[in-house]
Image: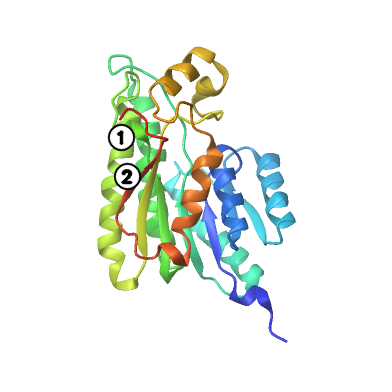
Amino acid sequence: MSDPTKTRKTILVTGGSRGLGRHTALAAARSGFDVVITYRSQREAAEAVSNEIEALGRQAAALSLDTSEVASFDDFATRLTHQLRAFRGSTQLHGLVNNAGIGLDASIETTSEEMFDQLVNIHFKGVFFLTQKLLPLIEDGGRIVNVSSGLARVALPGYAVYGSVKGAIEVFTRFLAKELGPRKITANCVAPGGLETDFGGGALRDIPQVNEYIASQTALGRAGLPGDVGPVIAALLSESHGWVNGQRIEVSGGWFL
């Protein structure tokens, strides 16, 4: 009798312990994928997400990773390879979701070099070199989804660096799609609008005035939820969306139209 786990595919979601990463991981599991998530400091939360995925009948694992530390990527790739082999004896990864990130709010005048470097290292340099490191593990015909932001399109005071590095991710995504085309690997980016999570200190979720402002600028009349976006990312990992490539897909409910 054949082992059904041999035919299943595994995806990796960075920053999967909370918010959009958690909802993406769960949506992917519901779509039939086994899931590895990464976390930087919230180990218990990441293990709770793994338990939720396993309750859906899928295999799951949580691995520590600081996406700003490029020097740690060799070790991470080794640990990921061991985990993939433990799942089903194969070291192939079907999909990579570059989601991990932080939010820093500062005007151009008050942005320090330290803040600038932190955002660039996590949101661009880390994404670039982690993707590069994992390309040998991603199977031909696989998927890469990068998480951008509506702030790459809409300029709101305080987010000059964040929006700029997300713009860089959108350009990088197109280059990935072009260069990985011969391997039939698709690359797309999903750009959420404002989401009610703890991202950036949770202001949108916890401060009514902020939430009301975002809702007032959204065609569907409310702020977004991570559950609005996770299933879209999961869809881009699936067979049905294999002809979508090199695209920026904004999932914002019609934010600042």
- The quarter of the picture where residue 180 lies is bottom left
- The quarter of the picture where residue 220 lies is top left
Q: Where is 164 relative to 36, above or below?
A: above
> Could you say which disc has been placed on residue 169 in the image?
2
Q: Is residue 52 left or right of residue 200?
A: right
The residue shown at (38%, 36%) is 149
> Could you say which disc has been placed on residue 152 in the image?
1
Q: Nearer the viewer, residue 139 or 212?
A: 212
Q: Is residue 33 left or right of residue 139?
A: right
Q: Position of residue 212 (x, y in %)?
A: 48, 17
> Could you say which disc has been placed on residue 126 in the image?
none
Task: Give the colour scheme shown.
Answer: rainbow
Q: Nearer the viewer, residue 113 or 187?
A: 187
Q: Position of residue 77 (x, y in %)?
A: 51, 60
Q: Is residue 115 left or right of residue 59?
A: left
Upstream in the sequence, badge 2 or badge 1?
1
Callout 1: few (<14), some (14-19), or many (20+) C-alpha neighbours within 10 Å? many
Q: Amino acid at mark 2?
A: Ile
Q: Position of residue 234 (x, y in %)?
A: 50, 54
The residue shown at (35%, 34%) is 150
* Circle count: 2
Q: Quadrant of the C terminus?
A: top left
For discs 2 and 1, the disc positioned in front in the rendered view: 1
SS at mark 2 in the image: helix
The answer to whether any part of residue 72 appears in the image is: no
Q: Are marks 2 and 1 in contact (CB under 8 Å)?
A: yes
Callout 2: few (<14), some (14-19), or many (20+) C-alpha neighbours within 10 Å? many
SS at mark 1 in the image: helix
Q: CA separation, marks 2 and 1?
A: 9 Å
Q: Is residue 178 left or right of residue 136?
A: left
Q: Amino acid at mark 1?
A: Ala
